[in-house]
Image (cartoon, rainbow, N blue to C red):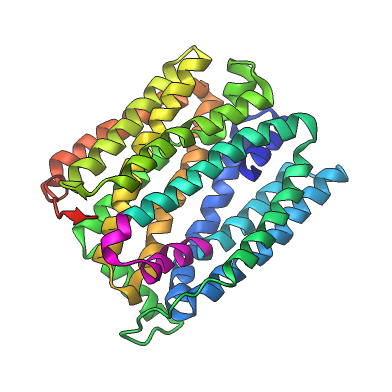
């Protein structure tokens, strides 16, 4: 809900696609600066405590956004600064949340667990994005910011009673560049890890167009905040459907091909979304974007957890965060700047075309990924 509110508010204040791109740039800078240290912290400290702590400051940032909006003292610069700090804190939350999963479920249930985790996030995007449009329409964006602050409290109190056993510590992890560098070396020494992360970055950098949705809602389809909520929800609906299927299957073979197919679908559906002149068809193509994203995301996440020892998971996910979260954030900036120069549809279509071409190039040049077929039995 807060993502929808921020994008809508910035576009209302500036009417500029480039200003929307600066939201992504602010988030990207935070991810680049904080991701690797955050991964080290997750491997060094108790992961449950890190996860709880990472919810406290974002609560106050949401309150600040709400208060500044209510008092009409909000401006784009303040939003960019608050987005920077919010994503800086989220770099610890993501690795902690993902690294905890292997401490909660057995290895044979990883793909189910990651399907359900990703699906729950997509369901929240469906409900939250659609609801955000109506809330903005009838109550204003400040209501979303204050409500978001409340949800952080709910999250904290829900985490407290969960019993999570300590993670393995095969080697001593110190707050040092040496320990952080070990995580980087581990990722770059494994061809499957680095190329799945590269695919993630390519798809998210070139085909991520979420920040442009206010332009489609306001200027292209003229559907207002409520239509904007539907646009944000569409991809999440597709992801949820794919997640239900993935959470219930019993075996996946040839995982490398499935990852490549998911990214190709993601790029092709993005092209169709950018070319569409029908609001209904656009919603359908965005659903397909979500399907492709879910298929590749779940299989990639499962492979990474299987290939990474427990004491290294936080640092691996810290590196992965730069690709997975940094990609879409800098991609949003790229999409905004291209849309400012050539229009939103061109920005979306060109990004989808580049994604498809680069994915095909990796499929051709990296046969080890294409032929990767370790079976995961569920």
Please state the total of marks drawn on the protein image: 0
For the question of whether residue 350 can be seen, the reply is: no
Q: Quadrant of residue 315?
A: bottom left
Q: Nearer the viewer, residue 21 or 174?
A: 174
Left or right of 319, for residue 21:
right
Q: Which residues are magenta?
A: 93-111
Q: Nearer the viewer, residue 122 or 64?
A: 122
At horizontal 83% and vertical 50% (from top left) the residue drawn is 67
Give residue 247's position: percent from left, percent from top: 34, 47
At horizontal 52% and vertical 27% (from top left) the residue drawn is 339
Q: Residue furthest top?
A: 277
Q: Is residue 104 magenta?
A: yes
Q: Residue furthest bottom?
A: 172
Give residue 79's position: percent from left, percent from top: 70, 47
> In the rendered image, which quarter contains the C terminus?
bottom left
Q: Is residue 189 magenta?
A: no
> In the rendered image, which quarter contains the N terminus?
top right
At horizontal 65% and vertical 29% (from top left) the residue drawn is 16
For the question of whether residue 21 can be seen, the reply is: yes
Type of secondary structure dominating the magenta stretch: helix
Give residue 118's position: percent from left, percent from top: 43, 49
342 w.r.t. 105: above or below: above
At horizontal 43% and vertical 29% (from top left) the residue drawn is 287
Left or right of 195, for residue 278:
right
Q: Quadrant of residue 59?
A: bottom right
């Amino acid at each position: 809900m807060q993502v929808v509110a921020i994008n809508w508010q910035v576009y209302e204040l500036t009417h500029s696609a480039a200003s929307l791109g600066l939201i992504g740039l602010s988030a990207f800078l935070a991810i680049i600066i904080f991701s690797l240290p955050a991964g080290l912290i997750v491997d060094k400290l108790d992961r449950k405590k890190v996860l709880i702590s990472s919810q406290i400051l974002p609560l106050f940032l949401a309150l600040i956004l709400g208060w500044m909006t209510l008092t009409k003292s909000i401006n784009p610069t303040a939003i960019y600064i608050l987005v920077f700090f919010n994503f800086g804190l989220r770099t610890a939350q993501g690795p902690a949340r993902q690294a905890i999963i292997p401490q909660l479920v057995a290895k044979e249930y990883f793909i189910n667990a990651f399907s359900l985790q990703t699906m729950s996030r997509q369901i929240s995007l469906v409900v939250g994005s659609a609801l955000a449009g109506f809330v903005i329409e009838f109550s204003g964006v400040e209501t979303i910011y204050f409500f978001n602050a409340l949800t952080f409290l709910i999250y904290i109190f829900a985490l407290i009673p969960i019993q999570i056993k300590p993670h393995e510590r095969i080697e001593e992890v110190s707050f040092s560049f040496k320990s952080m560098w070990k995580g980087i070396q581990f990722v770059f020494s494994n061809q499957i890890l680095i190329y799945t992360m590269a695919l993630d970055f390519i798809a998210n950098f070139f085909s991520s167009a979420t920040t442009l949705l206010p332009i489609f809602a306001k200027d292209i389809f003229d559907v207002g905040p409520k239509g904007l909520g539907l646009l944000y929800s569409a991809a999440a609906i597709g992801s949820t459907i794919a997640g239900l299927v993935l959470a219930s299957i019993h075996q996946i073979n040839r995982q490398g091909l499935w990852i490549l197919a998911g990214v190709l679908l993601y790029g092709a559906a993005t092209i169709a979304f950018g070319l569409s002149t029908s609001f209904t068809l656009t919603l359908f193509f965005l659903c397909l974007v979500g399907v492709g994203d879910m298929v590749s995301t779940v299989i990639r996440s499962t492979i990474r957890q299987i290939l990474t020892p427990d004491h290294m998971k936080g640092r691996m996910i810290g590196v992965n965060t730069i690709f997975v979260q940094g990609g879409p954030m800098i991609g949003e900036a790229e999409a905004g700047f291209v849309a400012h120069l050539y229009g939103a549809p061109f920005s979306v279509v060109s990004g989808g075309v580049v994604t498809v071409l680069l994915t095909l190039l990796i499929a051709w040049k990296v046969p080890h990924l294409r032929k990767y077929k370790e079976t995961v039995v569920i």
